[in-house]
Image (cartoon, helix red, strand yellow):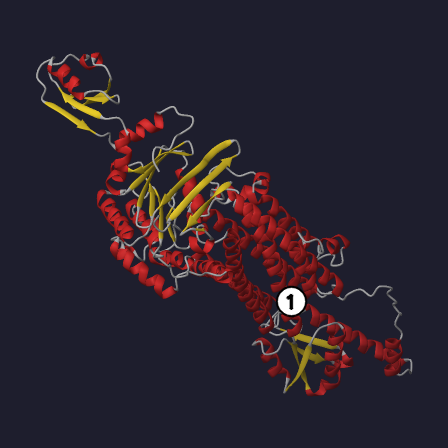
């Protein structure tokens, strides 16, 4: 009897196991619902922000032909206080008021006698526009006084503009923008939720195989490390797909609604860093979760077994989202972001906010990559020793020691 | 010596201070159905797990066709673990295809094999149901299919008959005999000794991690003490105690079962029986496997001795 050779290489075995994880996960209702809900939340957030900020970021102000001179100064003033104002000439006052009523114009500029500025709005005036108009009114009054003193308003203005204090920072601070802070928090939440969820799914999957005893059938044909690697890879890939769908939907929605006005390349950069840190964080935590999951035989015991690893994840995340938005260059957070256990939750927030020195970003990646093989070795050992012992929870020390 | 089949050679295993197996040795020849019996905790499951490489032995070796077994050769083993296990939420056919592919079958070959085994075992109608939705009996059939879909060259089945209805027991027996006819060595453990007696060519009885009896069933029975079944309705209950060389084993439906010490003359027993009144039945018989088993496992021998090899 000369049996035909049945071959299943390492790669093929891992691929087969990963393939099963992917099919099962993609088919699960819980996964689909969650992904759709997350996409809806992210896109909805963009639309909500957009509605809060008005339909167009530029304020449209109408003026009469006679007031062109003053009206032309309005966009300039607006610009200086960070507001975009477009001006449109209207045929007469009645038409202008009509357009304000039906919403075509945000406001109508009317210049009364003695260059007295007046603004017609539908109900309430936009705070930024009010500020701009007031500044403009102040300038007009200022110019009038200069003319009354026989001075040249243009010269005075040039002189005022030139007279600024010279600020000399010893360490130039990074100009954090509000949008990047939001992006940072969103990135932090996304990566935290993703690591937490997919890490737990790995632990649950390990326990499912253990409690249903199917693991014995599997281990009769493949090696423990192949099973663990396939499981982690499969769930990781599904998590990555989910993360990409949510991340891309969010960035596209943000850019499309103009809620996100940072450059496309910066947005893409954020998504790429998100993916890199998701992968690093996932592999680091997933192998640990797989090892810890193998210690218990019942789904109810998973929480207890995985708590130590969860604490690192949660602490990093909580500190990250509570400290960084108000203090982006916090020293403690800079240090934590380069400690492997905290890096996956802290570093992506810092990276999304910007201003992380290249060496810090690189160091964090290197230390995590250095730790992963150690964790894989440890987790594989625990897994191999504990996965066939059903019943009572296996002590961690026992699992590490047993040959 | 014929071509070697599955050899378990002096395999030992300890769990801390507990000796689970000590010098466990036996061979299952190609085409042979080997029955593995013993009380709970005697070491049957541990032996099978070691043969499958699920557990590592402390000492000893498992060989197939004369060569130490490896992960590659283990793919040829059809295994049914004592603790039944399948993914509860996976569909029957999909799960079996997956398991067959883990054994190294190509996807089309796996699908063909799964279809034919589901048909054969009478669960083809449930192929697209999740395993957890099946009755226990049908789950058992699927479990058996899982051991067979890879077209195994060796069968190692731990308690394959437990939980099966009589129809499934027949199907299972038939499948086992058929596989053996193809030259596959098959070993299975069971507590249903009548079944083992009926099906197996050879049996091994284990006690406390050691093989205490090993051989063809007839050989083992021949090695046991001879028995007499006597039906003497008018006899007083203690008549047989007077006869030298006779031990009373018990009663079966009013008939007395006696065991004779070697060299005892059965005619003397017959005379003694006739002296009490009429004798309706007087028969010699060999002990059944159940009796052999009972003797072997209760016998207080620290050094379990191998009866035959």
Residue A39 at x, y = what percent? Answer: 52, 64
Residue A98 at x, y = what percent? Answer: 58, 79
Question: In the rendered view, does B190 fall on the left or right side of A42?
Answer: left
Q: Quadrant of the C terminus of chain B?
A: top left
Residue B118 at x, y = what percent? Answer: 28, 56
Decide: is B221 above or below B31: above
Residue B15 at x, y = what percent? Answer: 51, 35
**Element carrying mark 1:** helix
Q: Is residue B133 visible?
A: no
The total of numbered circles placed on residues is: 1
Read off the residue under disc 1. A270
Question: In the rendered view, does A262 fall on the left or right side of A165?
Answer: left
Question: In the rendered view, does B289 fall on the left or right side of A59?
Answer: left
Q: Quadrant of residue A357?
A: bottom right
Residue closest to the eye, B16 or A66: B16
Q: Is residue B35 visible?
A: yes
Determine the residue positioned at 25% across, 39% down: B195
Residue at the limit of the structure toward the right, as seen here: A150
Determine the residue positioned at 42% across, 41% down: B47
Q: Quadrant of residue B278?
A: top left
Determine the residue positioned at 52% across, 31% down: B17
């Amino acid at each position: 009897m000369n049996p035909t050779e049945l071959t299943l290489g390492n790669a093929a075995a891992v691929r087969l196991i990963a393939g099963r994880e992917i099919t099962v996960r993609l088919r699960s209702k819980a996964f689909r619902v969650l992904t759709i809900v997350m996409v809806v939340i992210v896109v909805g957030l963009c639309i909500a922000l957009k509605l809060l900020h008005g339909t167009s970021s530029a304020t449209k102000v109408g003026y009469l032909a006679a007031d062109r001179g003053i009206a032309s100064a309005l966009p300039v003033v607006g610009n200086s206080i960070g507001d975009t104002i477009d001006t449109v000439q209207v045929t007469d006052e009645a038409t202008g008021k009509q357009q304000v009523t039906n919403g075509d114009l945000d406001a109508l500029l009317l210049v009364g006698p003695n260059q007295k500025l007046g603004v017609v709005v539908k109900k309430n005036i936009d705070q930024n526009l009010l500020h701009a108009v007031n500044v403009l009114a102040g300038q007009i009054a200022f110019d009038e006084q200069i003319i009354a003193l026989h001075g040249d308003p243009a010269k005075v203005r040039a002189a005022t503009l030139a007279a600024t204090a010279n600020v000399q920072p010893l360490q130039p601070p990074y100009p954090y923008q509000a949008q990047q802070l939001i992006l940072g928090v969103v990135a932090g939440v996304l990566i935290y939720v993703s690591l937490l969820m997919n890490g737990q799914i790995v632990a649950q999957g390990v326990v499912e195989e253990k409690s249903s005893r199917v693991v014995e059938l599997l281990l009769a044909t493949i090696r423990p490390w192949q099973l663990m690697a396939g499981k982690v890879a499969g769930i990781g890939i599904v998590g990555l797909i989910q993360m990409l769908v949510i991340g891309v939907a969010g960035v596209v929605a943000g850019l499309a609604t103009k809620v996100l006005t940072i450059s496309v390349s910066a947005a893409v950069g954020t998504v790429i860093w998100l993916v890199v840190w998701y992968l690093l964080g996932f592999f680091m935590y997933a192998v640990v979760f797989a090892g810890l999951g193998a210690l218990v035989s019942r789904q109810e015991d998973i929480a207890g077994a995985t708590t130590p690893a969860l604490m690192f994840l949660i602490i990093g995340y909580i500190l990250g989202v509570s400290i960084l938005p108000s203090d982006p260059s916090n020293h403690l957070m800079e240090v934590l972001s380069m400690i492997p256990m905290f890096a996956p939750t802290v570093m992506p927030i810092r990276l999304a906010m910007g201003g992380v020195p290249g060496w810090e970003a690189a160091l964090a990646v290197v230390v995590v990559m250095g730790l992963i093989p150690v964790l894989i070795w440890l987790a594989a050992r625990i897994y191999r020793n504990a996965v066939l012992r059903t019943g009572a929870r296996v002590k961690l020390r026992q699992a590490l020691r047993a040959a | 010596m014929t071509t070697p089949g599955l050899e378990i050679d002096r395999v030992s295993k300890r769990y801390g201070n507990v000796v689970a197996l000590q010098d466990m040795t036996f061979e299952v020849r190609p085409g042979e159905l080997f029955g593995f019996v013993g009380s709970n905790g005697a070491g049957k499951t541990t032996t099978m797990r070691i043969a499958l490489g699920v557990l590592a032995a402390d000492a000893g070796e498992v060989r197939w066709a004369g060569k130490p077994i490896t992960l590659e050769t283990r793919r040829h083993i059809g295994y049914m673990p004592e603790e039944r296990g399948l993914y509860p939420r996976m569909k029957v056919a999909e799960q079996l295809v997956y398991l067959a592919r883990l054994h190294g079958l190509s996807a089309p070959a796996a699908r063909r094999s799964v279809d034919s085994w589901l048909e054969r075992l009478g669960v083809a109608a449930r192929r697209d149901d999740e395993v957890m939705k099946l009755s226990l009996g049908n789950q058992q059939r699927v479990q058996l299919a899982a051991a067979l879909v890879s077209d195994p060259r060796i069968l190692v089945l731990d308690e394959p008959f437990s939980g099966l209805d009589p129809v499934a027991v027949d199907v299972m027996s038939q499948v086992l005999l058929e596989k053996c006819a193809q030259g596959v060595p098959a070993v299975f453990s069971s507590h249903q000794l009548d079944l083992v007696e009926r099906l197996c060519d050879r049996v091994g009885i284990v006690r406390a991690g050691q093989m205490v009896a090993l051989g063809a069933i007839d050989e083992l029975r021949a090695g046991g003490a001879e028995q007499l079944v006597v039906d003497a309705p008018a006899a007083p209950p203690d008549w047989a105690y007077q006869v030298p060389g006779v031990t009373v084993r018990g009663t079966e439906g009013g008939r007395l079962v006696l065991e004779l010490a070697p060299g005892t003359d059965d005619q003397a027993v017959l005379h003694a029986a006739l002296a009490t009144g009429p004798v309706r039945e007087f028969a010699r018989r060999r002990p059944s496997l159940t009796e052999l088993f009972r003797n072997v496992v209760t016998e207080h021998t620290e050094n379990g001795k191998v009866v035959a090899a």
